[in-house]
Image: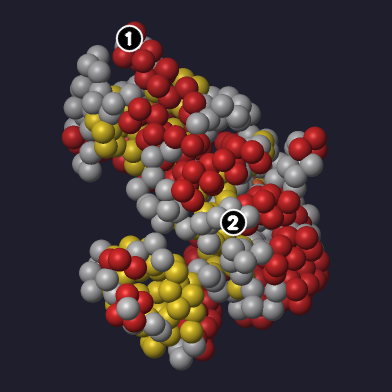
Amino acid sequence: MKDPKTYYIKTYGCQMNELDTEVMRGQLERRGMTKVEEEAQADLLIFNTCSIRDLAERKVMGKLGLLGRRKNTDQIIGVTGCMANAKKATLFRKIPYINFVLGTNDYHKLNDVLDDVLATGQKGLGIQNKFSEELDYAGAKRDDKVKAYISIIRGCDKYCTYCVVPYTRGPEVSRSPQDIIHECKILADKGYKEITLLGQNVNSYGKDKPEWNCLFHDLLYQLDNIDGIERIRFMTSHPVDITRNLMEAIRDLPSMCEFIHFPIQAGSSRILKKMHRIYTLEQYLEKVDLLKKIVPNAALGTDIIVGFPTETHEEFMETYNIMKQIEYSVAFLYTYSERKGTPATRFKDTIPDDVKQERLHMLMDLQEGIYKKQRQALVGSTAEVLIEKRSSKDPRFLKGRTRCWKNTLIEGSDSLIGTLQQVRVNDFTNQTLLCELLHQEASLIS
Ligand code: SAH
Ligand code: SF4
Ligand code: F3S
């Protein structure tokens, strides 16, 4: 096989996969490879996959199937990510021209596996159950120059009955505070302004390493001290582990953004129990109340699954009513998708597709109205925006986000990219706030 010079990585799924792609890019570039913009031109093509719902898997399998028909025989093809862990070597049977399969806990071996495939022409496989802490995060190759994802904990120990993640990412493994701080300092020196701390459940941080004496909120206090990092966000958290200490950190630390993802999943306590979410609706609402007391301007995000096995119309309406009551500022809405090997398969997938779709659309319509009302209420107000880049859709505008994660468009010059600006909200579209700079650029220069 010829030594590959170019690569293309197609990334599916969540932010963890996006970061893992950046880490793999770093490794490939260190062996002298360069990224190309077209899949067909790449000597090495990697599919970094997701297994969270059936549709996510079908998308990749469809894509791999299509590729087989027009495969350029010199191209090396690898499958990485959660589907690699879920399907393991069976992928070679399903799609015989795949050259390697590398799971979420094996990326440190990428170059070795590639070398083996090149030397022997044999298939490469790496599927460890547990993350081994050898990954060179600091070598990640990022395109974004303003904000960066930082992994702080991998895996998940929560075992929600519907979810594949504990099986595809393995048990929780925290990354050492020294390592995290070191990486954040390097990024701050390079001019990065915002970091998003990543984990399936960032609030579990440090619990697997009691000897470090550093829980999630302790880590936040240390990161807030880093000069240059203006904003800290995190994704994502399990409501059970959202503590008063965390809420106080959000209140007290200047760089902590007042946005917190607080995924409820369902509004019925019976369904929550079957999901093994380990909180009741009442306990969830108590936490939301406490958060609102401690951080009154906090914006909340959520994930919701409709059509979980045995969910009645009345139970679905409990979800609907809670969404109406809480008015989340971000809501990711899904229909239940049965995943092989998860405990929820024993309940059977009882809700017909059309009922799931109907419930989903009811929530989407409700949330659309809430978004509109929230944006309308912001018109005339001022906000702090981190200017991220020029909009590719409409190059007259710069793109940025408020502290509470709202998308904004603002007219201004490229010199503002990477700066925090005060803006006034003048108008909105259904996705975005249209803003103007409060201090015009001329006055900034003079
Ligand atoms: N660790 C995160 C979620 C990761 S998965 C958390 O607990 O919040 C992202 C979202 O996908 C979940 O919150 C859930 O709403 C949804 N999801 C997970 N498994 C699913 C399934 N089998 N069917 C439908 N949605 C699912
Ligand atoms: Fe999945 Fe639950 Fe873990 Fe989130 S907390 S990744 S939903 S098992
Ligand atoms: Fe998908 Fe794995 Fe993320 S299943 S959502 S890529 S953790």
Q: Which mark is residue 234?
A: 2
Q: Residue sitting at 50 percent across and 31 percent down?
A: 136
Decide which of 259, 99 is in the foreground and name it: 259
Q: Is residue 84 left or right of residue 314?
A: left
Q: Secondary structure at mark 2?
A: strand
Quadrant including the C terminus: bottom left
Measure how far apart labels 2 and 1 are at the Cα level. 41 Å
Please indicate, yes or no, whether residue 6 appears anywhere in the rendered image: yes
Residue type for callout 2: Phe
Residue type for callout 1: Ala
In this rendering, the label closer to the viewer, 2 or 1 = 2
Seen in the picture, residue 212 relative to 401 is either above or below; the reply is above
Q: Is residue 299 left or right of residue 97?
A: right
Q: Which mark is residue 102?
A: none
Q: Earlier in the sequence, mark 2 or mark 1?
A: 1
Q: Is mark 1 within 8 Å of ligand 3?
A: no
Q: Secondary structure at mark 1?
A: helix
- The quarter of the picture where residue 431 lies is bottom left
Q: Residue sitting at 60 percent across and 29 percent down?
A: 133
Seen in the picture, residue 170 relative to 401 is either above or below; the reply is above
Q: Position of residue 277 (x, y in %)?
A: 73, 55
Seen in the picture, residue 85 relative to 329 is either above or below; the reply is above
Q: Position of residue 303 (x, y in %)?
A: 59, 62
Work out which residue is located at the far top of the displayed protein and give it.
120
Mark 1 crowdedness (10 Å alpha carbons): few <14, some 14-19, many ≥20: few
Decide which of 269, 386 is in the foreground and name it: 386
Q: Is mark 2 within 8 Å of ligand 1?
A: no
Please indicate, yes or no, whether residue 273 appears anywhere in the rendered image: no
Decide which of 225, 290 is in the foreground and name it: 225
Seen in the picture, residue 276 relative to 131 is either above or below; the reply is below
Residue at mark 1: 119
